[in-house]
Amino acid sequence: MRAYGFKSNGGTEVLEEIRVPTPAPGPGQVLIEVAYAGVNFAEVQHRRGEFGEPDGPGGYDVPGLEVSGTVVALGSGAPGPPVGEQVAAYLPAFGGYAEFAVADADFVRPVRGLPLASAAGVPCVYPTAYGVLADAGRIRDGETVLIHAAAGGVGSAAARIARTLGASRVFGTVGSLEKAEQAAALGYDALFIREGFADAVQEATAGRGVDLVLDPVGGPVRRASLQALSPFGRVVVYGDLGRHADWTADVWDLWKNSRAIAGYNIGDVARRSPATIGDHLSRALSALASGALPHDRPAVVPWAEVAQVHGRFEAGDTHGKTVLDIAGRGAV
Ligand SMILES: NC(=O)c1ccc[n+]([C@@H]2O[C@H](COP(=O)([O-])OP(=O)(O)OC[C@H]3O[C@@H](n4cnc5c(N)ncnc54)[C@H](OP(=O)(O)O)[C@@H]3O)[C@@H](O)[C@H]2O)c1
């Protein structure tokens, strides 16, 4: 089958079109003929080597954490979905930038009433957004939320979901005025430029701060996020876009100021509580199909442009979701 992969870590130039054996579904797995593959910042990190060196078939790793497509075979004991069903799947072991992908049935859910192009951007992003808001962030009715990288894939899903989980006000930070314009349709109460956001948050909340901050950025943004919390506020750490050196939080600062830091990692949750991911994926797909969650159409990009798309992610030059058109169906 055709795939895009890399056999050494590096810049976008290491991504190449390759031919690799079509994977066979193992016990409890589903083989999917891929229609669209969602692109995630984590795949940039994978390519750069932040998850280790490639060690797949022929020495290549094929990135890709989420896909939509059609079930074409079931491994032994896989409960479904049946052959022929249109599905979305989270792929914790990667492999989505390919004509076929195998997924554990735990992470595969039927797609009904939602375009397959849109569904490809759901399986990694939406369970992460539910996880950071509800599982790690323990959001409660009436709370205020601040979302960093507010126009991004996870950020834009979290903005929509936060309202359905009871948030009273949802704020976001972005890197530029252009991004603020792009995020405006997502229903934020206010958007702030990330530089100096803590003062803007204090002003917007009359000095109280916010109950919950979602932080995939790290470094100085993480430190300032702690300062932007209300009493019993939580910062959920779920990424480090800026590749900052790690830092040690001052426990005195946390207990003297009634603040908390929580962490979230979808790969960890998928290993230790797979049903949690499947449940969040089902919930997201049905909320998007019913209109309970607004459905923002992704940018659909020809598969051959994957290196340019990675470059745009690294430059912070994307918003919303971008999906690769693997089967040549176009934007449907
Ligand atoms: N822990 C987990 O389980 C989990 C799961 C999924 C994703 N994530 C993390 O969530 C984050 C967002 O992922 P995504 O796929 O949805 O990407 P994305 O938000 O669509 O794109 C990244 C955005 O982050 C902002 N940004 C800030 N600093 C940046 C930097 N140094 N380099 C590049 N962009 C920067 C940019 O927006 P501005 O212009 O607004 O700055 C950029 O558009 C990533 O850190 C990813 O690793 C974590």
Image: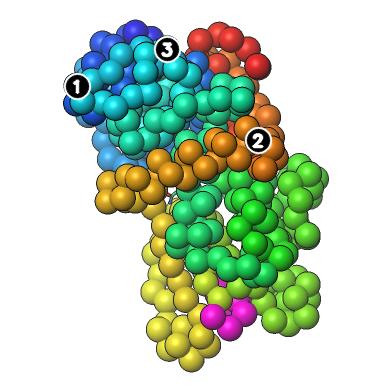
Position of the C terminus, as image quadrant, is top right
CA gap between label 2 and label 1 equals: 33 Å
- The magenta-colored residue range is 224-232
Q: Dot 1, crowdedness within 10 Å: few (<14), some or many (≥20)?
A: few
Q: Is residue 53 left or right of residue 94?
A: left
Q: Is residue 293 left or right of residue 136?
A: right
Tell me the kind of residue under disc 3.
Gly
Q: Earlier in the sequence, mark 3 or mark 1?
A: 1
The answer to whether residue 240 shows anywhere in this view is no
160 shown above or below 132: above
Q: Earlier in the sequence, mark 2 or mark 3?
A: 3
Residue behind mark 2:
290
The label number, if any, that marks residue 322 in the structure image: none
Residue behind mark 3:
84
7 shown above or below 139: above
Residue behind mark 1:
76
Residue 225 within the magenta-colored segment of the rendering: yes
Q: Position of residue 281 (x, y in %)?
A: 47, 40
Per the image, label 1 sits on a secondary structure element best described as loop
Tell me the kind of residue under disc 1.
Ser
- What residue is drawn where x is 45% and y is 71%? 261
Q: Earlier in the sequence, mark 2 or mark 1?
A: 1
CA gap between label 3 and label 1 equals: 17 Å
Position of the N terminus, as image quadrant, is top left
Tell me the kind of residue under disc 2.
Ser
Per the image, label 2 sits on a secondary structure element best described as helix
Residue 7 within the magenta-colored segment of the rendering: no
Q: Position of residue 95 (x, y in %)?
A: 35, 25
- What residue is drawn where x is 78% and y is 59%? 189
Q: Check contact, mark 3 vs mark 1: CB within 8 A.
A: no
